[in-house]
Amino acid sequence: MMKFKITTRLREGIKDIEGDAIKKQVNANGWNIEDMKVGQVFYFNAPHHKIKELCETVLVNTLLYDYEIEEVRKGFF
């Protein structure tokens, strides 16, 4: 088993309604944010040879989201 971090974000061209709402609220509080995107991060242990299959069949809707797989060094979590 290996430790992984999976980061998801909406694909280019998909409207990020949640990110737009957060940006609007942040800017209403005096910040000058030009772009806000919302995604998810998953941390877990899994067999290395199954990680892409796990992402594409369970964790990530690949029609809407891009994802990145990172191996996490020992002691991270």
Image (cartoon, rainbow, N blue to C red):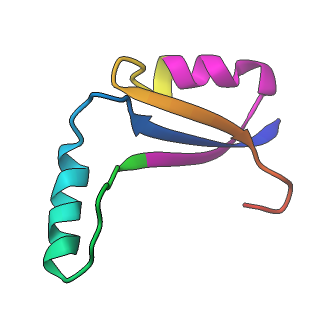
Magenta region includes residue 44: yes
**25 horizontally vs 4: left or right:** left
Q: Where is residue 48 in the image (x, y as percent from the top left)?
A: 79, 27
Q: Where is residue 51 in the image (x, y as percent from the top left)?
A: 68, 25
Instruction: Kindly identify the residue that appears in the image at 34 percent across and 50 percent down.
Output: 37
**Above or below 74: residue 26:** below
Q: What stretch is highlighted in magenta?
A: 40-56
Q: Residue furthest right?
A: 74
State which quarter of the image contains the C terminus.
bottom right
Instruction: Kindly identify the residue that appears in the image at 29 percent across and 60 percent down.
Output: 34
**15 horizontally vs 49: left or right:** left
**Above or below 4: residue 52:** above
Q: Where is residue 44 in the image (x, y as percent from the top left)?
A: 66, 45
Instruction: Kindly identify the residue that appears in the image at 19 percent across and 73 percent down.
Output: 27
Instruction: Kindly identify the residue that appears in the image at 78 percent across and 19 percent down.
Output: 49
**11 horizontally vs 18: left or right:** right
Q: Quadrant of residue 45?
A: top right
**Above or below 5: residue 57:** above
Magenta region includes residue 69: no
Q: Residue furthest bottom?
A: 30
Q: Position of residue 29 (x, y in %)?
A: 18, 82
